[in-house]
């Protein structure tokens, strides 16, 4: 009796295994096909970009592949842009916990991106060079797109159903009131250049330094309140697909997000990137470095993207739509969720490291069992680590004994960024 039961189970197990296998194959097939193109016109030679389609979540396992697309728009020289292109990806990957599944990996990305950006900035500043760069850094894993950005390069999502939305926030003093307030509160002065006679010209800038941006990587000679902490947004596209346009301000000074998307809608990615650059140059001439990457996320069984998403899918997405973002001031978030074809997973733009590095529940530990710095990943001896929350003792929410922990150097950097002390790494 028992053995017959066992045999029956065995029979059942075979088709079940086959079924799971089939499911897994389907899942693999459901990943989008990426088609991409890039076009650039140089004026100063300070724009750089990165395209990597061969990254692996689990090294040596091609089924864990993810892709990276990034634009770096340098200023006051190209060193910061080159350094960031060479190091940022490694620093982000280095801040990811090991041995976790895909869902946990995607969830850990926003924090690793913050750590990677700050570490890259710290390392570059240590070289004592004065150039700086924007960084708009896009990671695509399956249908999930994670964008981290400082500066005014932009990543735009066109879902082809007439919905165009920015996945980045422009960190430009001229148009970002919140950032203006943050810079002023941290000890910076915001104002325009004044020429003889007292007339003010040009965009709002931050002093000392005279930078128009409120966040960047590098810029050793400006105030530490110009921070490298990125705005991070994570969305999941429906399997209808979509198009990303990642570009430097050479494009955005000439074209709105909408105009750029519309200018290239019917073209494949390779031609689309060229068309957007051409359109920008026609509007404004070549007045700045102009770089554009177009990435199409295409359903694998449908290599031509439909112009409107199917309605049934919309209703399903409306039910699934889940917004974790803090604050409600984001018009574009509302626009995105209004069309209900994009699931918003995460959005955070605070410049405060304590808020961005969060609780230590999934904190990465060193192999020696010691704690490591949440930013630069160096081992900490227990007496050295300072909680990211320390220093806010009077706050009821303060948890000075809890991680994540920072090394002395990163703690100094954090305080300097928040206007609490002058920088320890600034080159004079
Ligand atoms: Zn550190």
Image (spheres, rainbow, N blue to C red):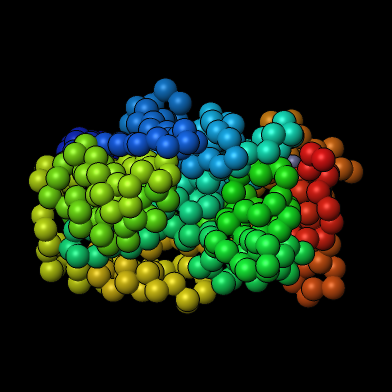
Residue 252: % across, % down: 38, 55
For the C terminus, which image quadrant? top right
Q: Is residue 95 left or right of residue 387?
A: left
For the N terminus, which image quadrant? top left
Residue 426: % across, % down: 78, 43
| 214 vs 143: above or below | below
Quadrant of residue 167 within the rendered picture: bottom left
Q: Is residue 257 left or right of residue 352?
A: left
Residue name at image x 48 percent, y 60 percent:
170
Residue 258: % across, % down: 27, 62
Ligand 1: image quarter: top right
Residue name at image x 40 percent, y 46 percent:
287
Q: Pick the residue in front: 195 or 263.
A: 195
Q: For residue 138, say whether it is visible.
A: no
Residue name at image x 42 percent, y 22 percent:
60
| 68 vs 401: above or below | above
Q: Is residue 391 left or right of residue 329?
A: right
Residue name at image x 19 percent, y 65 percent:
162
| 252 vs 59: above or below | below
Residue 137: % across, % down: 46, 44
Residue lying furthest top: 60
Q: Pick the residue in front: 81 or 86.
A: 81
Question: How many labels were placed on the picture?
Answer: 0
Residue lying furthest front: 197
């Amino acid at each position: 009796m028992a053995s017959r039961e066992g045999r029956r189970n065995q029979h059942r197990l075979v088709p079940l295994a086959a079924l799971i296998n089939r499911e897994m194959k389907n899942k693999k097939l459901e990943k989008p096909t990426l088609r991409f193109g890039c076009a650039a016109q140089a004026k100063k030679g300070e724009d750089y970009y990165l395209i990597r389609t061969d990254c692996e979540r689990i090294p040596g396992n091609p089924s864990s592949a993810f892709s990276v697309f990034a634009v770096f728009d340098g200023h006051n020289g190209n060193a910061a842009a080159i350094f960031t292109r060479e190091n940022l990806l490694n620093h982000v990957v280095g801040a990811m916990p090991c041995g976790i599944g895909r869902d946990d990996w995607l969830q850990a990305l926003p924090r690793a991106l913050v750590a990677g950006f700050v570490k890259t900035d710290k390392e570059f500043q240590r070289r004592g060079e004065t150039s700086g760069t924007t960084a708009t850094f896009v990671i695509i894993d399956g249908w999930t797109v994670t964008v981290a950005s400082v500066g005014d390069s932009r990543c735009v999502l066109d879902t082809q159903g007439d919905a165009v939305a920015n996945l980045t926030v422009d960190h430009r003093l001229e148009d970002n009131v919140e950032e203006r307030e943050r810079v002023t509160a941290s000890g910076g002065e915001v104002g325009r250049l004044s020429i003889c006679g007292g007339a003010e010209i040009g965009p709002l800038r931050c002093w000392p330094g005279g930078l128009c941006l409120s966040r960047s990587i590098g810029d050793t000679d400006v105030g530490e309140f110009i921070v490298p902490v990125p705005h991070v947004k994570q969305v999941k596209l429906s399997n209808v697909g979509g198009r990303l346009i990642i570009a430097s301000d050479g494009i955005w000074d000439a074209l709105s997000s909408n105009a750029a998307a519309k200018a290239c809608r019917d073209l494949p990615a390779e031609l689309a990137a060229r068309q957007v650059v051409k359109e920008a140059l026609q509007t404004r001439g070549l007045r700045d470095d102009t770089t554009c990457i177009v990435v199409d996320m295409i359903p694998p069984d449908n290599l031509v993207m439909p112009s409107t998403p199917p309605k049934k899918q919309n209703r399903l997405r409306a039910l699934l739509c889940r917004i974790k973002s803090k604050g409600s001031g984001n018009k574009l978030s509302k626009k995105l969720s209004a069309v209900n074809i994009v699931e918003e997973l995460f959005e955070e733009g605070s410049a405060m490291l304590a808020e961005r590095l969060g609780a230590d529940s999934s904190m990465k530990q060193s192999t020696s069992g010691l704690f490591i710095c949440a930013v630069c990943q160096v081992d900490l001896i227990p007496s050295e680590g300072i909680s990211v929350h320390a220093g806010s003792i009077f706050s009821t929410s303060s948890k000075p004994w809890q991680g994540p922990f920072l090394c002395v150097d990163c703690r100094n950097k954090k305080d300097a960024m928040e206007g609490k002390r002058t920088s320890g790494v600034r080159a004079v």
